[in-house]
Image (tube, rainbow, N blue to C red):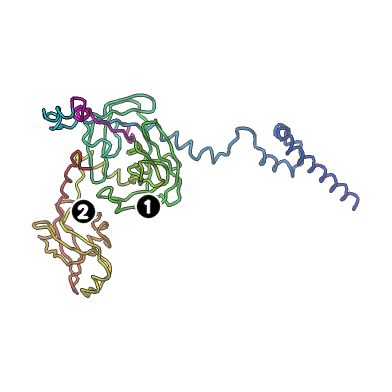
Amino acid sequence: MRKLWLIFAQTATVVMGILFVLSTLKPEWLRSAPTAALPATIAPSLAAAYPPAGAASGAQRAGYSLASRRASPAVVSITASKAPSRNSEAQDPWFKFHFGQRGRGKEAARPQTGLGSGVIVSADGYLLTNNHVVERASDIEVMLTDGRQARATLIGTDPESDLAVLKIELERLPVIHLGTADSLQVGDVVLAIGNPFNVGQTVTSGIVSALGRSQLGINTFENFIQTDAAINPGNSGGALVDVDGNLVGINTAIYSRNGGSLGIGFAIPISSARLVMDALLRDGQVARGWIGVQTRELTPEFAEAFKLPLTSGVLISGVLANAPAAKAGVKPGDVLTKVGNTAVQSPAQLLAAVAALKPLKPATLALQRGEQQLEIEVLVGQRPKPQPVQDGER
């Protein structure tokens, strides 16, 4: 028995030695040789160490390339042209005398062109993009990845969320599948698809680095998905998709000091974009609630100074005359704690909660006035439209 064991051990040692030498000096011999001829205990390990050429892992292969193939055809490039702004100085004879015909007057007469991206979300030809991509544009051209081009019609815009809806008239349009941003978690892989710097369609990958980003000063209503997938000028209005190719956001802005990507990009969740799109298609505008108050954070110092029996809520610092809140009896110094059934703890939460109310419908506000708890019914107004930004104001 001992002899047999020694023979087996020596044989196994020799075989392993031969395999080690071959794997080091002639690995192609092992890849081309059928593993079935090897001992059963060795064949599986060799098959894992030396997979057949071209046999990439199924999970790796399906990870990003499949999502890209599914989503990319529905992402388009947008060229928005604006009529040249009138420059009264350029027509002034004294201006022409000092600066000449080739001076600023001629430069100002050139049409302005902006580049961005968009996403086809309907077989009828409806597209989602950013408002700032098509703002004040007189002509909007859309180019698909298959080379087709079409002039787009502007259906509606919502500057406060920086979204716009376009429509093109083409047949057999590729349509992206709408996902849900609610299922996203920090660390999930996402792809950003667009036309950065007008170099052509580009796909970049990254992860969700934060959710619910607000108070950035980008839009009035902010609830951004933050990602480190590279987003650059020209990506605005493009698609943020998950690993299955489903649309989860509209790429909107980057944090940058030099105009390039620094690994912090922001996208509007598709849930918010869908609500805006539905409102624009149904009503031609996004009607939001408004009560007409000015707000501040409720600080512990203020609560202590005025001996308030609470530490959470939103301080009303001002009430506009003849606004719904003023008519309902809301006063400066009140602390608003609830809008309907929604608790509010910051001005941003209050803004979102009031905006979600239906105009011309009653709503209940819960207030703390000194030591009194009050409930006031208010007839919600419609939020006034923001004033358009004129050229040169940005």
Q: Residues within 10 Å of mark 2 (few under 14, many from 20)?
A: many
Q: Nearer the viewer, residue 274 or 205?
A: 205
Magenta segment: does it hold 102?
A: yes
Task: Tell us which disc is closer to us: 1 or 2.
Answer: 1
In this orientation, which residue lies closer to the viewer: 392 or 21? 392
Residue at 15% over, 56% down: 292
Res 324 → quadrant: bottom left
Asked whether the viewer can see residue 381, the reply is yes
**Residue at 43% across / 36% down in the picture?**
203
Cα distance between the residues tagged 1 and 2: 24 Å
Q: Quadrant of residue 148?
A: top left
Q: Residue 381, percent across and down? A: 14, 52
Which numbered tag is attached to residue 244? none
Residue beneath disc 2: 357
* Position of 247 relative to 99 (above/below): below
Quarter the C terminus occupies: top left
Q: Amino acid at mark 2?
A: Leu
Q: Which residues are magenta?
A: 100-123
User: What percent of the width, then of the height, locates residue 233?
Assistant: 34, 38
Q: Provide the residue designation for mark 1.
A: 211
Query: Which secondary structure, mark 1?
Result: strand
Residue 285 appears left or right of 6: left
Task: Name the residue type under label 1.
Answer: Leu
Q: Which residue is depicted at the point 25% across and 54% down?
A: 352
Q: Is residue 245 magenta?
A: no
Query: What secondary structure is marked by label 2?
Result: loop
